[in-house]
Amino acid sequence: MTDRKKVFVSGCYDLLHSGHVEFFRQASQYGDLYVGIGSDATIREYKHHHTVYPEQERLFMVKSIRYVRDAYINAGSGVMDFVPTVESLRPDVFVVNEDGSTPEKEAFCRERGIEYVVLRRLPADGLDARSSTSLKRDSCRIPTRLDLAGTWIDQPYVSKYAPGWAITVSLEPTFEIRERCGLSTSTRNCIRSIWPYKLPDMDPEILAKLVFCFENDPERSDGIVSGAQDAIGICMPGLVRHYYGGHYWPSRIETCLDSAVLDWLEGHLCLIPMFPRRPGCSVVEDSVIDRPRVEALAKAADDCWEAILRKDLDAFAGAYMASFEAQVSMFPAMIQPGVQEYIDRYSSKDGVLAWKMPGAGGGGYLALVCRDSFPDGAIRLSIRRK
């Protein structure tokens, strides 16, 4: 009789729930199950928050599950923190959920001759689907924002060369909003320090201005003024454009809440997770800001808005790309090491028409414009209506 295969899975398992247990059950069908658990230090470094349960308590809970043969605290760091555990354990099979699968993990297993298995996220029979993301989402309903065009023009040192619009959409928090990934988590965290669970019921534009003023405390020691597009993009529902001409706050704001337009956008926009912006990264190094570049940025935003309202997909994709190219021409450090590899990988996929990084770049996500379907692993978006 041959020995049973060693099966390995890895994760944080902080908010342990029935979805985790069902995942362990399914994975254990491939052999004896061993679990690598993210350390407190890794979670603080990678996800920028403290755990609900410390690592030894999480280890105790996971080891107590009957499908688990043994469990360990991973000694590595970052998204590949399991590497030392795998090299010591030498498993035969590495199992991941479909939303936890990455090219890096697959390549890692291929290089070591480890079978790589991707499971669908399915609840146990008779139970509702559970995920850590949904548990966190249900407790906090603060939106985030995605910028579509004109990024950087909300900074006076950019718009002084030429005025123009920034375009944002306010997104429901239907997915785990990762820190330092271009989705305005610093502004969102400022909001959560006042209103932890949801935005107050008040005029959205006034709320956006309150948030902008709160975040940009005149006593801030770093001297940085966060752009207004973050507060506006989070607080004002729907599709919004805001016009800047040498000032921190826009002189005009226009909103589109047309369901047909927003439905159309949701059908063509998605996010691909990359790596967070690395500590010490400066995307303003070697910047080249002049009138022609800013005018190109402003024109792309004009074209983008008109294309969206017409629901002209090819024109939208072209303007979207033109806006990103204008951004990168001014701030080439947005393309940090590793970013181009993601662009090359996803730009070549069928149906992908355009791409950019949200926010100031440097990492985070790729925001794709797609024709009819989204690539595997893409995050679907839900635009806030009210």
Image: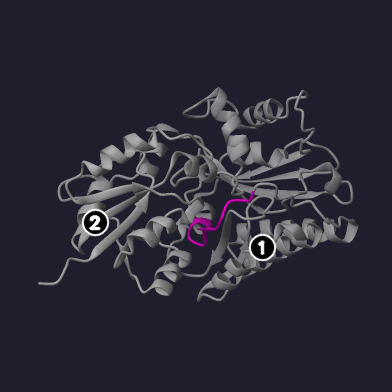
- Is 152 on the left-hand or right-hand side of 207? right
Query: Residue 77: where, in percent of width, then height?
Result: 50, 50
On screen, residue 278 above or below 268:
above
Residue shown at the point (30%, 59%) measured from the top left: 8
Type of the residue with mark 1: Pro
How is the model colour-coded? one colour
Q: Is residue 131 magenta?
A: no
**Which image quarter: residue 86?**
bottom left
Residue shown at the point (62%, 55%) measured from the top left: 363
- Mark closer to the observer (2, 1): 2
Whether residue 351 is visible to the viewer of this picture, yes or no, is: yes
Query: Residue 257: where, in percent of width, then height?
Result: 55, 45
- Is 73 on the left-hand or right-hand side of 262? left
- Is 232 on the left-hand or right-hand side of 345? right
Real-space Cα separation, disc 2 to disc 1, in angstroms:
36 Å
Q: What numbered label is drawn on residue 95?
A: none
Type of the residue with mark 2: Leu
Residue shown at the point (71%, 49%) measured from the top left: 166
- Is 18 on the left-hand or right-hand side of 288? left
Which of the pair 57/376 is nearer the observer?
Answer: 57
Report the magenta residues as a range: 265-278
- Indicate the quadrant containing the N terminus: top left, top right, bottom left or bottom right: bottom left
Which of the pair 220/330 is nearer the observer?
Answer: 220
Q: Is residue 269 magenta?
A: yes
Whether residue 384 is visible to the viewer of this picture, yes or no, is: no
The residue carrying mark 1 is: 337
Which of the pair 353/217 is nearer the observer?
Answer: 217
Q: What numbered label is drawn on residue 33?
A: 2
Element class at badge 1: loop
Query: Residue 263: where, in percent of width, then height?
Result: 48, 55
Which of the pair 183/67 is nearer the observer?
Answer: 67
Q: Residues within 10 Å of mark 2 (few under 14, many from 20)?
A: many
